[in-house]
Amino acid sequence: MIPRYSRPEMVSIWSPETKFRIWYEIEAHACEAMADLGIIPRENADAVWKARNATFDVARIDEIEAVTKHDVIAFLTHLSEIIGADAARFVHQGMTSSDVLDTCFNVQLTRAADILVKDLDGLLDALKARAMEHRGTVRIGRSHGIHAEPTTMGLTFARFYAEMARNRDRLVAARAEIATGAISGAVGTFANIDPRVEEHVCRELGLAPEPISTQVIPRDRHAAFFAALGVVGSSIENIATEIRHMQRTEVLEAEEFFSKGQKGSSAMPHKRNPVLTENLTGLARLVRMAVIPAMENVTLWHERDISHSSVERNIGPDTTVTLDFALFRLTRVIENLVIYPDNMMSNLNKFRGLVHSQRVLLALTQKGVSREDAYRLVQKSAMKVWEQGADFMTELKADPEVTAALSEAEIEEKFDLSYHTKHVDTIFARVFGDT
């Protein structure tokens, strides 16, 4: 991923230095286990561990790979240069390249997941704080982009909080599914390596042994992992799109914080654009872009092929780096989002009480008017508001068919905004618990 959309902690997980360090730990732990089992001499295993403070020369490994055309062999050759050929004699014994590559990849993915969970925790904190702040800030709810009935800004934030809380659960589950390792040798039969070596290596790396591998760890695990990331990306876009709509000039119920010295347009000095949430919409597309290739990686020939490899070398770092950046950016957007309660109320009243139509409809039916007739009566007055700019309450009071069923006082009571917010606390208790 380009530096513009990257953060150092996540990027470091995917650096060559980190990758080779994990490869080394896999090999060293395997040697340690084999020494414990009496398969190789203890001194050879100890000699491998003497390289624990070594710095692996990425350029040198690349130089070797240019000749061998094999990245794991290039690394093992470089390791033997560091610890000596005799000490390296038993390194990688009974193992295959995928034992190193797949186990390393899953270590990287679990570490990336840990960062992403931490990112989600920060976003959840921000969403909860804004939900509490605007629990009772009334705004118009919209369906199909059209005024529907009143809601509150706090409920909007609470809805996004609940969605992201579900995403956190999904990501924790995806992390657990991907946290497996395999040190099972060619075609996964353990013919040349003891299963206890795998158990030891996985334990040391914080993984569970893959119950049954072929020569690779099954890719349905990775498909589930990247699918979970894709859902998080879609939720980011969901929030970003709501903010972009709220920032439209015709709405202006909220907007991204516009800092001193910031400029919105090279041509129009008046512009204040939702650039961060537009950016998040684009980044979400990149995150979801990994889902289909990850699904397609599930199908491999027989016990292994490497059709998945080039895909994962791209989507592993790119997707996790992008999502990490997007979650961090969205958290800052939420924390600094400027809310305009007066504009919310102005928008709500724009159509002169029209948003209370359902209450009048229900009141008429409760007075004995058929639903069909009640709908017709309310819609007749409502259309005058849409088409002539009339006042909804005034039109209702002027309709003898309506006033035959409802008194003026009863009509007026149906325009009480507090009616629509009476269960906000109940919803908040469902989302946040007792607060």
Image: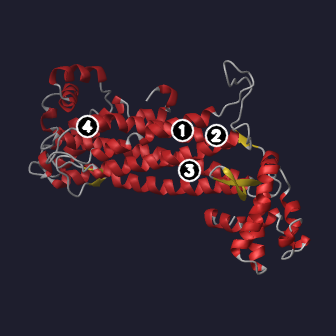
* Mark 2 and mark 4 residues within 8 Å of each other at the beta carbon: no
Could you say which is closer to the camera, residue 396 or residue 217?
A: 396
* Mark 1 and mark 2 residues within 8 Å of each other at the beta carbon: yes
* Mark 3 and mark 2 residues within 8 Å of each other at the beta carbon: no
Work out whether mark 1 precedes mark 2 in sequence or the reverse, and give the earlier one. 2
* Numbered disc in front, either 3 or 2: 2
Numbered mark located on residue 244 in the image: 2
* Numbered disc in front, either 1 or 4: 1
Q: Secondary structure at mark 3?
A: helix
Work out whether mark 1 precedes mark 4 in sequence or the reverse, and give the earlier one. 1
Mark 4: amino acid: Ser
Callout 2 crowding tier (Cα within 10 Å): few <14, some 14–19, many ≥20: many
Residue at 20% x, 56% y: name it: 212
Work out whether mark 3 precedes mark 2 in sequence or the reverse, and give the earlier one. 3
The residue beneath circle 3 is 121
Could you say which is closer to the camera, residue 349 or residue 162?
A: 349
Report x, y in % for residue 340: 78, 44
| Quadrant of residue 336 within the rendered picture | top right
Work out whether mark 3 precedes mark 1 in sequence or the reverse, and give the earlier one. 3
The residue beneath circle 4 is 309
Work out which residue is located at the far left of the displayed protein and give it. Answer: 191
Residue at 80% x, 61% y: name it: 381
Distance from label 1 to label 2 (Cα)? 10 Å
| Quadrant of residue 433 within the rendered picture | bottom right
The residue beneath circle 1 is 281
Mark 1: amino acid: Thr
Mark 3: amino acid: Asp
| Quarter of the image that includes the C terminus | bottom right
| Quadrant of residue 424 within the rendered picture | bottom right
